[in-house]
Image (cartoon, helix red, strand yellow):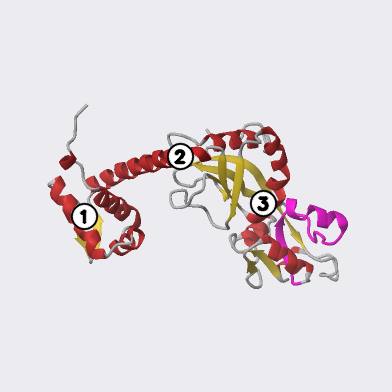
Amino acid sequence: MVQLTRSDLPSMASLRAIEALDRLKTASAVAKELSQTQSAVSRQLQLLEQQLGQDIITRRNNRLELTPKAKEFAETIRTSLGMIQSATQDLQFEHQANTLTLGILPAFGMRWLMPKLGDFSKQHPDITINMLTRLVPFNFDAEPIDAAIHFGDANWANTSAMRLKSEYVVPICRPDYFDEQPTLFSLAASDLLQIMSRPKSWSNWFIKQGFDQDIKRPATSYDQFSTIHQAVLAGLGVALMPNYLVEEDLARGILICPYEGDGQVAQSYHLVWPKRDRIKPAVRKFRDWLAGQVEGEDPYPR
């Protein structure tokens, strides 16, 4: 093994600067993330060029761009910094090895996950689960989160994923919302409600039913299913909702499904965790337990 002297190694500040520039693309964004001035970032990059003995930055239209070789270097630095961060956290939080910080989607977490957690607690009484709710994807590099539940296609960068549940949506409304059984045409002309994070949900649903006419006006968007649910109960319109959220209301007749159609959604709910050399023991135990709670026979990633 080659022994490097201290003078052979670039400073941590310069390594963080080149990694951030490759990821964020602008010096101003790098300066903001590193809590430095743009001139300080430029000095770090200049010092790195001097130490490496070659240009790593090209300036084009007042923008800083990395050379192809510098991009490869930045990718290696990113991997190495991630390993250093992981090792540091393992050492710092060794006493928290049995703590799991889980990010959840509000509605899915409350209605699907929570009722199952009693079984996990019985099997693993030594593990404490802390939960954070969020409507947007989590950033494992920037937030103290061990794993999260996301909805989508399981193509999030630098993560592994395990499928939990597919989604089936149904249109719902109050029993007195329509005077007569609606057609697709009258349904498309009604007040449509949808979740903000899925702006094409209604248009995709209509296409799936073979309806190719334009929807009369844009659907009203809400940021959470709980808010949409209250809007429907108030008679404000027709909403597309995951069936697991409204089964009880439909069974009791509080709400109705005004049109029976194909509501299968292509995306699914997934448990997601960062790709790292070492997976936290609490994450592994939670993942293995959750595999027994999901749809299908083989939820593990390939």
- Residue at the spot 28% in from the left edge and 46% down from the top edge: 74
The secondary element bearing badge 2 is classed as: loop
Q: Is residue 145 magenta?
A: no
Left or right: where 288 falls relative to 40:
right
Residue at position x 59%, y 44% from top? 270
Compared with 46, 123 (above or below) is: above
How far apart are the two marked residues, 1 and 2, measured between alpha carbons? Answer: 29 Å
Residue tagged 3: 108
Q: Residues within 10 Å of mark 2 (few under 14, many from 20)?
A: few
Mark 3, other Cα within 10 Å: few <14 / some 14–19 / many ≥20: some
Q: Residue at x 66, y 43 (%)?
A: 165
Q: Quadrant of residue 175?
A: bottom right
Task: Give the labeled residue for mark 2.
Answer: 275
The residue to which callout 1 is attached is 45
The foreground one among 197 and 45 is 45
Residue located farthest toward the right when viewing the structure as drawn: 252
Pick the front one: 14 or 210: 14
Q: Amino acid at mark 3?
A: Phe
Specify whether residue 239 is painted magenta.
yes
Residue 26, quarter of picture:
bottom left
Query: Which of pointers 1 and 3 lies earlier in the amino acid sequence?
Result: 1
Q: Quadrant of the N terminus?
A: top left
Nearest-to-viewer mark from 1 and 3: 1
**Mark 1 residue element:** helix
Magenta-drawn segment: 236-261
Circle 1: residue type: Leu
Q: Earlier in the sequence, mark 1 or mark 2?
A: 1
Relative to 107, residue 76 above or below: above
Q: Position of residue 279 (x, y in %)?
A: 49, 35
